[in-house]
Amino acid sequence: MQNNPAIDRLASLSVGDISAVIQMAWEDRTTFETIQERAGLSESDVIALMRAELNPSSFRLWRMRVRGRTTKHRALRSPEMKFDDHTVADHRRANC
């Protein structure tokens, strides 16, 4: 049986790390790329984490919220967007 690296990454997260990822995932201005840089989780890993940690109705609400949201992907953002998602992520992390 072969190990799944995504499951290994999720299993290695502490309770605080999981909380921080959930906060960043709910935050509109924090991109999936920033979450990847901070926690080492891809967008699909974040989706799996949210599915496992949220109750089903909250997960569906979150998926509806982020699906197609341009602020969650750096490449889709308008150049006029001037905020830095790293700063937002730092602020969220400091308040955990």
Image (cartoon, helix red, strand yellow):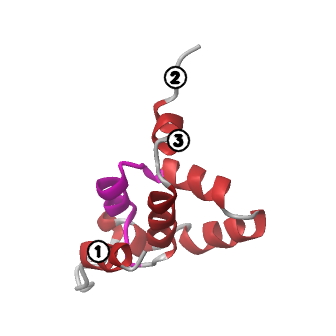
Element type at mark 1: helix
Q: For residue 31: magenta?
A: yes
Which percent across, then down, holds residue 27? 46, 77
- Give, as a three-letter code, the residue at label 3: Ala
Q: Nearer the viewer, residue 12 or 32?
A: 12
Q: Does 83 sit above or below residue 19? A: below
Residue 17, image quadrant? bottom left
Report the side of 65 relative to 20 (left or right). right
How far apart are labels 2 and 3 at the CA level?
12 Å
How far apart are labels 1 and 2 at the CA level?
32 Å
Residue drawn at the location 46% of the way across and 49% of the way down? 13
Mark 2 neighbour class, 10 Å CA radius: few under 14, some 14 to 19, many 20 or more: few
Q: For residue 92: magenta?
A: no
Q: Which of marks 2 and 3 is in front?
A: 3
Which mark is on residue 3? 2
- Give, as a three-letter code, the residue at label 1: Asp
Report the side of 17 relative to 51 (left or right). left
| Residue receiving disc 3 | 11
| Residue receiving disc 1 | 90
Give the quadrant of the C terminus.
Answer: bottom left
Range of the magenta residues? Answer: 29-43
Mark 1 neighbour class, 10 Å CA radius: few under 14, some 14 to 19, many 20 or more: few
Q: Does 30 sit above or below residue 38? A: below
Element type at mark 2: loop
